[in-house]
Image (spheres, rainbow, N blue to C red):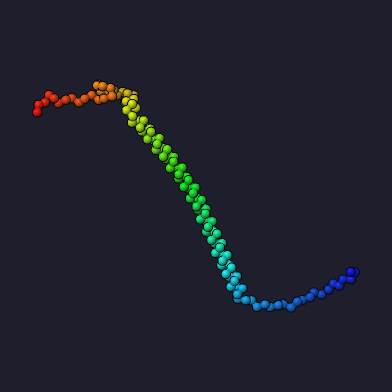
Amino acid sequence: MGNRIYHTNSIRNARVHRPISARIFTWLAVIAVAGVLLSCSFVIAARQHFQAISIGYQTEELRKQATQQEEQVRQLELEYSRAASPFEIEKRAGEMGLIRPEGKPGKASPAPSKAGRGH
């Protein structure tokens, strides 16, 4: 194991020229087109997914607004029915200094009769 031979001169191999097949370029082109189509389809699917999520959030926000508006309508209807009640009307009329006409409480006095006139 003592003597090893090292070559000091570099060895040059002859170049091998291989013919380039047109089929290889065709396959590379087909693979490249398929890769581009696949990548584009992923981008389109991702965009649609994010749009669907965004629309879902918008829909949820609109549902919340509709619920709040329905509650507000109920509150306004309740306030209207309280304000339109006969007791509340009499109370506000009394605060304004209005008094009930003579007659039975709760009913207006009857209109004067036309019995004195002849037919």
Q: Residue 97: which quarter of the image?
A: top left
Q: Position of residue 71 (x, y in %)?
A: 42, 38
Determine the residue located farthest toward the left in the rendered image: 119
Q: Is residue 58 above or below residue 109?
A: below
- Quadrant location of residue 31? bottom right
In the image, farthest residue toward the right: 2
Q: Decide: is 47 above or below 98.
A: below
Nearest the camera: 86 or 12? Answer: 86
**Who's the residue at 54% across and 61% down the image?**
40
Give me the residue at 28% from left, 24% from top: 106
Placement of the N terminus among the 4 image quadrants: bottom right
The residue located at (67%, 77%) in the rendering is 18
Please tell me in which quadrant of the rendered image residue 43 appears: bottom right
The residue drawn where x is 36% and y is 30% is 82
Q: Is residue 110 above or below residue 47?
A: above
At which x and y percent is residue 79? 38, 32
Quarter containing the C terminus: top left
- Horizontal side of 113 relative to 40 (left or right) equals left
Residue 77 visible somewhere in the drawing: yes
Side (left or right) of 90 relative to 25? left
**Position of 114 relative to 72 (above/below):** above
Residue 89 showing in the rendered view = no
Residue 38 x %, y %:
56, 63
Question: Left of 4 or right of it: where is 55?
Answer: left
Disc tally is 0
Q: Position of residue 58 (x, y in %)?
A: 47, 48
